[in-house]
Image (cartoon, grey):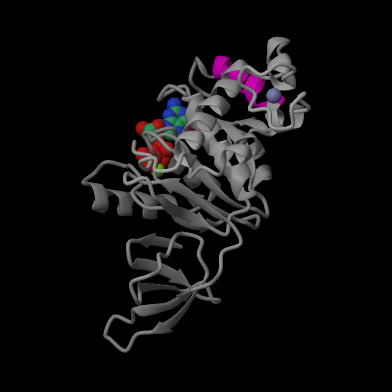
Amino acid sequence: MAAHGRDAVVENEDRERIRCRLAGRRHAVVCGDRVRWTAGETEGGGGTITAVLPRTTELARLNLRGAAEPVAANLSQLVAVLAPRPAADFGLCDRYLAAAEWAGLRACVVVNKFDLPDAPALLAAATATYRAAGYPVVRASRDGEGGVSELAARLAGETSVLVGQSGVGKSSLTNRLVPGVEAVVREISEAASAGRHTTTASTLYHLPGGGELIDSPGVRDFAPPLPAPREIEHGFREIAAAASCRFADCRHLHEPGCAVAAAAADGRIDARRLASYRELLGLAEQLARPGSPRFRR
Ligand SMILES: Nc1nc2c(ncn2[C@@H]2O[C@H](COP(=O)(O)OP(=O)(O)OP(=O)(O)O)[C@@H](O)[C@H]2O)c(=O)[nH]1
Ligand SMILES: [Mg+2]
Ligand SMILES: [Zn+2]
């Protein structure tokens, strides 16, 4: 349900929660993991995680040392949350969506805080970019009638993670989507961050209509571990779909007969998405060079 370093909250079949500690040194445990555990003999009734079961999917990020670090496991869907405030970062959203593609997750984009005056303009921009790419774009707001109904329908039956910049309203949406959870969230975040209501660890909740929702800590930036250069285009589904180029190994930079460049020139592919693709391709090629230093942010 939640993990922080070697400490985790585990839920059993009866939905009872047990504080557990991960045994051994080699493995990490993350939110969404399925684990084998044993009840502790100690007072307080904690347990020990003895094994992390194989993951069906994994969302990971590059950490500060340039190594892949799992963030959440066994997901079926990534939900990228944008808001008018803090100002939406489409490049960040592109990197999250690419991570979802490489990890084999469904993905959608939420334009949150729809009560704010500049939200309709953001929805128009996000729709133009992401619906054209093949992603559902839904509006949401923590308040008001129907504020989360469209999103709730998207989450039903899925194991979803809410991701995005700090302050876009992920926890507020979680509170609205999971009745009765608000007090717990506030309590935990106040204890952990001295009154700042910012999420410090991913936490999994059961949705009332079925399905699971993970509220994750906001980020300032996010980079996924990159696949080989040839796989980068599969992080951008509309680019991969348009890539009937003259050369089979076209990188969609400035090659003659590039179908992707042609699609961008007549507006069928968003120029900003193509720029995000080229940026990640550049990084992947840098990493693939023999003897290249590891990617640092
Ligand atoms: N106007 C408006 N403000 C909102 C809405 N949802 C959240 N907020 C405000 O946005 C701020 C951040 O909300 P959170 O839910 O804590 O955002 P978060 O994405 O969980 O932030 P991190 O945990 O730091 O990643 C708070 O001050 C909320 O009151 C909304 O729908 N409309
Ligand atoms: Mg939060
Ligand atoms: Zn091309």
In this rendering, the answer to whether 70 lies above or below 29 is above
User: In this view of the protein, which residue sits in the foreground, 165 or 147?
Assistant: 165
Could you say which quadrant of the image residue 171 lies in? top left
User: In this view of the protein, which residue sits in the foreground, 213 or 278?
Assistant: 278
Image quadrant where one finds the C terminus: top left
Residue 121 is one of the magenta-drawn residues? yes
One can see residue 208 in this view: yes
Q: Position of residue 244 (x, y in %)?
A: 78, 27
Which image quadrant shows ligand 1?
A: top left
The boundaries of the magenta stretch are 120-132
Residue 153 is one of the magenta-drawn residues? no
Residue found at x 26% / y 52%: 192
Please name the predominant secondary structure of the magenta segment in the image: helix
User: In this view of the protein, which residue sits in the foreground, 72 or 227?
Assistant: 227
Q: Position of residue 23 (x, y in %)?
A: 35, 77
Could you say which quadrant of the image residue 166 lies in? top left
Residue found at x 70% / y 12%: 267
